[in-house]
Image (cartoon, coloured by chain):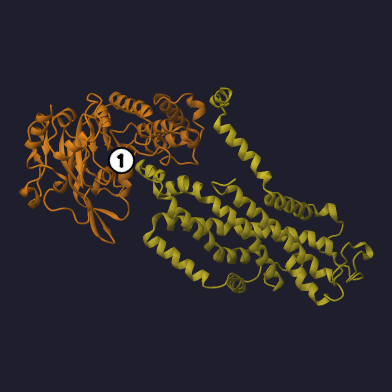
Amino acid sequence: MSAVSATQAPAPVPVPAARARRRRARWYRQPTLLVGLTLLAVILFMCYGAPLLTSFNPDTQNLEEPLARIGQYGHLLGTDQEGRDTWARLLYGGQVDLRVAVIAVLFPFVLGTILGSLAGYFGSWVDVIVMRLIDIVVAFPFFVLVIALVFVLGTGEKSIYIAITAVGWVSYARITRGEITVAKRQEYVLAAQSGGLSSLRIIGRHLLPNVITQSIVYAMSDIVQNMLAIVTLSYLGLGIQPPTPDWGTMISAGQNFLTTQWQLTTIPGLAVVLTGLSLSLIGDGLADLLRPGTS
Amino acid sequence: MSGPLQLEVSDLRVQIAGQHGVVRPIDGVSFEIAPGEAVGLVGESGSGKSLTLRSILGLLPPEATVTSGKVVFNGTDLTQLSQARLNKVRGRRIAMIFQEPMSALNPVMRVGNQIAEGPRIHLGMSRAQSVARAVDLMRRVGIPDPERRFRAFPHEFSGGMRQRVMIAMALSCDPELILCDEPTTALDVTIQDQILRLLAQLCQESGTSLMFVTHDLPVVAQVCHKVAVMYAGRIVERGTVSQVFSRPMHPYTLGLLRSAPDVDRPDQSLVPIPGSPPSLIAPPSGCRFHPRCKFAEEDCKVSEPPLRLLDAGRATACLHYEQCLDQIGADT
């Protein structure tokens, strides 16, 4: 009897509140996301808090103290061949690389999402054109095309943005197109059409908010790829131009002294790896968090 | 049949070119709706009734095309309109309510904004005006505490409440005609009754016509004045609800009525219609119902019977409809 009354009197839990609580509780229970965010926070603090962590100017040459060893003359990580403090260049260089990597993800994100949603929603010839463009771009390896484009456009930050946009939009277009092709068969789209909404409004207001999460998750891993692209370009002398500090130029400048001054190359390389790792972890964590139907 | 017609669909034909040949899910459908009238379109799954409804607003799936026929709404043939001009009719003058209130609402948009979207686009309302209108509509369709529920998402609503939201959306621009695609099929019977009453009441208040597609005969009896019965892409019988339900003039209608429980005659055993709906790729010759019809004679297999107009707005496509009437006479 008591068992029956117990099951018959469930506590009336308001569903929306419970769901909101679960959502709020979830994000910090994602270990991958948590580790990634912590790591990135530390990196961001170190790069943008550089004046707090070093008193050296990253661009000031000191030809009396070239190639100082670790700790010599008060230089935490020594100096490069022009006597510039490696620790300061590492921190300030990170600012440049992170900024360029994040900005370079926005343009392809916007362009790819627009083209992909048009192709997915309208189909027919719009789809054919967009898909052929995608085929052309993916026929080349990412780095080959980016390097070729930067080479043609000339070095500098602007060229990096243009080159990465021209190549990177493809992934966003594919993701968005696939998602929209599925989502446009949902009844709420038919309902929106029967309400007399224009196609652009249906795409922008009804479809994209439903499908954009996949692209956002991908953008996280794309930042990593952009980061590597920028470092690679700078390493090849096509990216960020000296004397602006940047991890790619540091690696390339330091490699001549690898046997005696290993930290000139290895430490910036390690910085690239750690930043990439943190962003990848965030991407994985976000994917788990945002993917519908899992928790 | 007095006064101008609001909607007149004549000889509508739709075809779908599939892998296994051309399918004609709608094959010469004609019906009309007068202002303020509620018309039911009844038929089994796959009879083409939902597609008929969608073709009125030009919302056919991409693989389907209208091959002939007219959809004249207040003097304008909707099949001839451009997409842009059609968008001025959709939602503004003809609204639509869907079967699944779960999937017909955008899951990531606040319900209030979904209701307010129509007035803002079609009636040129400002944000504040449209929000006020949405709240007012939510109150009219019986959603409690509309100011607070305005900001809720569809998943926070029950099925019945979601269908109320759909009705509020449909009413948001004061349309002249509302098309309902099985709006209560996904709901509990008790909720179904509430929703039907609400819909009928609101349409009566505003003089809105209603077109109701369903396979549920009691729903038609509750809401509609007139009914058309559809079978395998054609209308086989038409008339007022009381006429058709009491004196069906097509064996298919008779079969539908006999296979549904009747509250007034609980002792009556249910008689299913034998066989299954015909393949639309290769429909039977002659009358499409003849393989399942117990009254079928030789002439039914030869020529396709047209929908013949009888007195008092009735029409039937059966060559031997008198036999249906005899059957009813014998039973009672």
x and y percentages locating residue B84 in the rendered image: 33, 47
Q: Which residue is mark 1?
A: B89
**B226 or A129, nearer to the observer:** B226
**B270 or A25, nearer to the observer:** B270
Q: Is residue B10 visible?
A: no
Where is residue B9, by image quadrant? top left
x and y percentages locating residue A52 in the rendered image: 84, 52
The disc numbered 1 marks a residue on which chain? B
**A281 or B229, nearer to the observer:** B229
Q: Is residue B27 visible?
A: yes
Query: What hue does chain A carry in this figure?
Result: yellow
x and y percentages locating residue B37 in the rendered image: 22, 30
Q: Vertical placement of A278 versus B30: above or below?
A: below
Q: Vertical placement of B26 versus B120: above or below?
A: below
Q: Quadrant of the N terminus of chain B?
A: top left
Left-right relation of B89 to A68 = left
Left-right relation of B18 to B146 = left
x and y percentages locating residue B319 in the rendered image: 7, 42
**B181 or A251, nearer to the observer:** B181
Q: Which chain is orange?
A: B
Amino acid on which the number 1 mark rests in the picture = Val
Left-right relation of A149 to A281 = left
Q: Residues within 10 Å of mark 1 (few under 14, many from 20)?
A: many
